[in-house]
Amino acid sequence: MTNRYVAAKGRGTFRRISEALRAAAPGDVIVVSAGEYSEQLRLDRSVAVVAEGVVTLSGVPGEPVIVAEGLECTLRGITVRGADDAGPPAVGVAPGAGLLLEECVVSGGRIHARGNETGQGSDLSGYGVTTVMLRRTRVEKGRLAGLHLSGRVRAKVEDTVIDTVDGIGVVLSGNAFLDASRVRLNITSGYGFRLRGASRLELTDGVIRQSGMAGVLLEDSSTAALTDVRIDQAGGPGVHAAGTAKVVLTDCRVRGTRASALVVQDQADLTGADCIVSDAGANALLASDSATAALTDSRFDRSTYSAVHLTGTAVVRLTDCLIRQGAEHGVHATATSRVELTRCGIADVGLTGLSVVDAASAEAEDCRVGGSGTGVRLESSVATGFRGSSVSGSVGTGIELAGEGLASLEAVRVSGGKAAGIVVGSSAAAEIAATTIEDCDGSGLVVWSGARPSVRALRVAGVAKNGIFLAEKAAGTYADCDVTGTKYPALHLSKGAAPTFQHLRVRDCVEALGQEDGANPTFEDCTIDGVPMVAESAVVAAAGAPVVTPVGTLAESMPPDDETLEDVLEELEQQVGLDRVKRDVQSMVKLMQTVRMRQEAGLPAPPLSRHLVFAGNPGTGKTTVARLYGRVLKALGLLRRGHLVEVDRTALVGEYVGHTGPKTTAAVNQALGGVLFIDEAYSLAPVGIGNDFGAEAIATLVKLMEDHRDDLVVIVAGYVNDMSRFIGSNPGLSSRFTRTLMFEDYTAAELVAIVEHQAGGHQYEVTPDARVALSDLFEQLPRGEGFGNGRSARQIFQAMTERQAHRLSELTAPTPDQLVSLEAADLPTTY
């Protein structure tokens, strides 16, 4: 081995590197003094080129700067500057050659290693395989790709940075294999890594940041194993597997993708363990076609769409995984896909925790679903199962069974929901066994018309309405069930219901049975508070207890029992604006307090109508004040429940003769003890239409207001002029609605305050400049029919958060203050 020296001057040295290369023998070392060299190097034998000081090597346009053709070539400490075009690479490695780049910089061009496309297939251990190694090297500012390995290439990359590539960071094709560790790939306009053909990637302790498209794309039959890899802010998916590709993720983090974080399609397969996916721009995991995915001990946080979405015939298996704070469903299985969940948790998602529709199948065991819109919805035409699991704190129904396929619930606990515990839809086939429903604000088990579930060992305790509610013509068998501590009748049987109850035990309920005419139940060995149920007790309806039939999309809110009048009035005072309304409510409170004192003293009460007209434009707080008004009356002892039931024309008016009266009655029954709030009430009396079912709804409403005058308050709301016409449409309305509260449009300052209130509730802060800009915006905003007052303010707040998110996505590492600040630049430019 001989050292050959290259320098600008000096005796016995070469002036150009290429001259030294021509003189070198295999195994020689060429030592290059510091300086800039403009020439092309062809390493056609096994030599090493080593920098002594800072050495920069520039080529000529249209030609590679360096071409390695020898078996064992080395570059150490050299900066290679390419021509920064889409032509030849800066560094090229010929088929069968070998190149080591150590402590080098390749700038303005890519590294391209080619291997023979024919030969020993995937065997990269024999003669003729191209070998490449990068160690402590930087590749930057290239085009097309940073590193391209094609054909029979075996590469190893360690402690290397690939930065700012106008194209793809790393491309593997053919049978290329890359073993990479401690690689940092930053800012590419295309994919971070792209694998094609039968190529293979092993990436350990890596970072892929701000790729313009997918962080890692696998196509054809390629494979990848990613261990301890961080993928941040990918412009597409974090990992995207297609074709028959296979990818294994271990201890990986995928954050802030603009599309779905993990995508697996065609016949590809994804396996993951100990992974975290957060803040995905769409799904956390999207599986389609015939793809498969299996993840264990992993977490999916804050997905913009459903966290896990399946379609086609895809199969997904999740074990010991956690899904949190998604905007839509936790798991959503569609088409003919299949999902299997074992020991998984789903919490705080916006829609449904587990949703199974179409002909998808699902099996969930030992899972926990909490705080979602609906806990679980099984609406498939094939069999589904939910076993040994729990659903808690749902905003809507705990579990909905709505498909024609058999839905099986076994050893399930439903608790703390704001609506019904379990609902069996009209066409659903359901088996429910060893299941508990506790402390729900609606009925425990609701069975809709025509459904015939098989229910065994069901326990319903402490629900706010019926324990078991059967709609018209519902049936089924209910064996060994317990119903305890309900606030409405334990059982409600609608017209035509024909269930069979075997060994039913009813204890400590307000009543045992509410039964409509035409119901035909069968009771076998049933007891009420330990006493055998006899025929007479089975047909006595609950005296004075309202029959509650869910209608349309009625929304109910129940105030707490221990709330005081001072609490409610203080909350009213905290509302933005509404000064005139607040004074009117305070005046009515004083009047009603006087009425109550006169009644307690045995004196006659002055005339008092508690029904109100709310007149004003949309978004002026009418619904909020209506809810507070009900709570005021409850705190005064003038309403027993104080809840709000909000309806519109569609919930009151039927579609055919004889339909409107029952619908209106059902809405009123649900509001008894509280407030019935009818929004856009003027639509019940449309202009120029004489034969309309709305008139029947008004007549029914007037009669029921009289029948329940001590147990019902009605508030009608709408535009000022339209409400005057509505009240005048029926003499019964004008005599009962004698007080109108005017809801004035919010001022610009009040709208700014609403935005700031919304911001504070979501942990944002409006900067002073943004506050001034908001005020100017609201001053100039046209207040025509499209203006929504408070709704417009909330929509502008939402638009500001979206624009802030886009603005922050351009920052490398936003500070905590930047994350919470809404600035003037975040205001929408058009509204």
Image (spheres, rainbow, N blue to C red):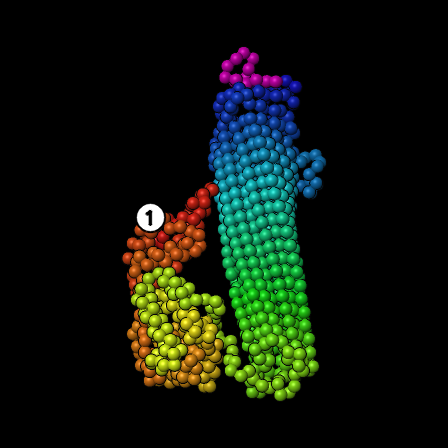
Q: Which amino acid type is shown beneath numbered disc 1? A: Asp
Question: Percent position (x, y) of residue 158?
Answer: 60, 34
Q: Which residues are magenta?
A: 3-17
Image quarter of residue 625? bottom left
Res 268 seen here = no
Using the image as rendered, state which of residue 303 and residue 139 is in the foreground: 303
Residue under the image location 37 percent in, 66 percent down: 621
Res 189 seen here = yes
Image quarter of residue 306? bottom right
Using the image as rendered, state which of residue 419 and residue 535 is in the foreground: 535
Quick check: 49 above or below 496?
A: above
Using the image as rendered, state which of residue 120 and residue 639 is in the foreground: 639
Left or right, 776 with respect to 439, comes to left
Q: Main secondary structure of the magenta part?
A: loop
Using the image as rendered, state which of residue 95 and residue 297 is in the foreground: 297
Quick check: 176 above or below 789?
A: above
Mark 1: which secondary structure?
helix
Residue under the image location 34 percent in, 69 percent down: 585
Q: Badge 1 local density, few (<14 within 10 Å), some, or many (20+)?
A: few
Question: Percent position (x, y) of residue 405?
Answer: 63, 71
**Residue denoted by label 1:** 769
